[in-house]
Image (spheres, grey):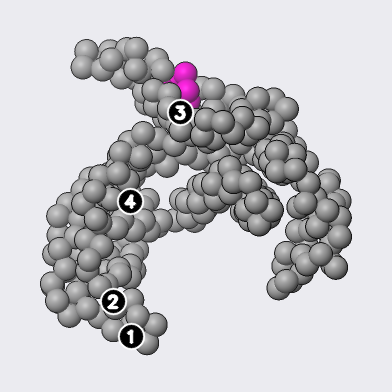
Amino acid sequence: MRWNARHAMFKLPAGETNLRSNRGWFRMRISPARLSRQFHELTLVVITYEYPLNERIRTLLRLEDLYDRVAFFVSKSTPLDHQAALNSLFEILDVSSRGDLKSDLLQELDRQRLFLEALRSNPAISVEKLDRVVTEIGDAFAALLAMSGKTGQHLRENEWLMTIKQRTAIPGGTCEFDLPSFHYWLHSDDHLRRADILAWLEPLAPIGVALRIVLSVLRESGKTLPLIASRGVFQQMPMERATHMLRLTLPRALPCVPEVSANKYALNIRFILPGSVQRTKVYESDVEFELTYCNL
């Protein structure tokens, strides 16, 4: 992995030099704060659960997960890995087809840029770092704005890809006797398959970069409180205002998972047993956890 000052650029380990599209390296940007947080969580052996409280954040989290999957599977070399990467690409196409996604991201990026510009008069702010972040947001805004037409139209116009996409909805529908041309593609050289996937993904990359910036801002804006769920149940009335996402962190050793119900009037969290038979049974001991209220 190679890192820049604020975000990470996704590259293959040394020696694998074929992860390149026609326009250069495909970059997956990940906030260092997020990476540091994940390392901290692994060190303390905890699990963090994120719960979006509106459809917009729910869509961004789903897309973030799908972009991460593509980045992971495309870096591998086997046909099965590249088939998984292609399936995730189809899912990105479906999720990103929401009509107002692009405008929502543009609006949020512009709002964050204006907010940061207003900090220039603050003597406690590093102008150099501020310029770097503002430039990055500006680049993401420009790349997103330059996307023309309907999101993913280049994929919809590819008849071969759409045939594969239709067959993926059928269990086992992409077997070699159903799609011999797809079977042939899966047996081509791995660097050719990787180049194809990156070329298909590249026009969608501005959405991935923009949503990572927005989610990074959302996560870093959070206010974290240490709390205790008495006998596995926590209630708060009313809930924190203008909360867009909740982040719950608890020790991985605890044999329970949080079940969240939230609206503008109340927040209810039940910690339930994760077993398939007792999945609705409340964990009847006190649970110490951290709750972060995240707002844009």
Q: Which dot marks residue 131?
A: none
For label 4, count other residues whose C-alpha is less than 10 Å away and answer few (under 14), some (14-19) or many (20+): some
Point 30% across, 44% down: residue = 39
Q: Which residue has dot 3 on it?
A: 2
The magenta-colored residue range is 133-137
> Reading the chain from its start, which is encountered first: label 2 or label 3?
3
Name the mark nearer the viewer: 4 or 1: 1
Q: Nearer the viewer, residue 168 or 215?
A: 168
Q: Nearer the viewer, mark 2 or mark 3?
A: 3
Residue named by callout 2: 272
Badge nearest the viewer, 1 or 3 = 3
Whichever of callouts 4 and 1 sits on the residue coming sooner in the sequence is: 4
Rate crowding at label 1 as few (under 14), some (14 to 19) or many (20 or more) other CA atoms within 10 Å: few
- Amino acid, disc 1: Gln
Q: Which residue is mark 4?
A: 243
Task: Provide the secondary structure element on which disc 2 rests.
Answer: strand
